[in-house]
Image: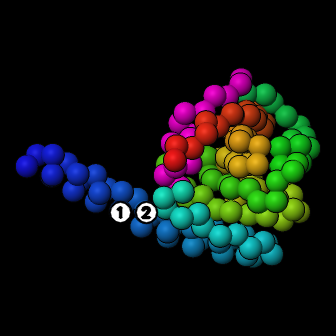
Amino acid sequence: MLAMANRNSERMNKLQTQNRLKKRAAALVGDWAARGVSVSPVAHDRYWLLLEMLGGGRSGPPQWTDDLLGELRAFSSGSDMLTVLGWNVAEEPALLVGADKLMAQASALNEVYPDGFVLISDFAGKALLVDFDDDEGTSIETMDLPTPKA
């Protein structure tokens, strides 16, 4: 009986999180649309998989950068589509965005995601973690993502 109650509680928490993500995704889609960029929310099952992959990834040490646009170009090279999440990935929805559209509006990233963001390239099997710090500047980390479980 206790196991059933725990499963129901976990399911309810997951549904509440998905509802919050859906509302936040609608706001972000609007923010991007105002900048002329079409983005699409990632399906919830894919979102949970991405969180699992980010939790199991390996990253190098953070590096300070004065050339975020150059870093974004290098990271997205070869990718048609990228996935972007706000810095607090457990509270931010994942959105699909065309790599070229993201590059065209890269200067707006700190407005849409003021704390930073995570950019995922399925093509490269990597994530780029970008942290905006008001005092210190912008730091980045590249993370190798594990292969998703089938």
Tell me: residue 49, above or below residue 20: above
Could you tell me which secondary element the residue under label 2 belongs to? helix
Q: Residue furthest top?
A: 61
Magenta residue check for 10: no
In magenta, the rendered stretch is: 47-61
Residue 5: x %, y % from top left: 15, 52
Query: Is any part of residue 33 visible from this angle?
Result: yes
Image-quadrant location for residue 130 = top right
Residue 117 image label: none
Report the number of numbered marks: 2
Query: Of helix, strand and loop, which mostly describes the magenta segment?
Result: helix
Residue occupying image coordinates x 57% and y 44%: 148
User: Where does residue 3 sit, x and y in percent of width and height?
Assistant: 15, 46
- Picture layout, residue 11 above or below residue 58: below
Residue shown at the point (49%, 68%) measured from the top left: 22
- Locate residue 142 relative to residue 54 in the image: left or right: right
- Residue 63, how many percent across, how many down? 78, 28
Tell whether label 1 touches label 2 (CB within 8 Å): yes
Mark 1 residue element: helix
Q: Residues within 10 Å of mark 1 (few under 14, many from 20)?
A: few
Label 2: which residue? 18
**Amino acid residing under circle 2:** Gln
Viewer can see residue 69: no
Q: Which mark is residue 15?
A: 1
> Residue drawn 36% across and 57% down?
14
* Few, some or many residues within 10 Å of mark 2 (<14, 14–19, 20+): some
Instruction: Give the residue type that dot 1 points to.
Output: Leu
* Cα–Cα gap, marks 2 and 1: 5 Å
Q: What residue do we see at 63% from left, 28% from top?
A: 58
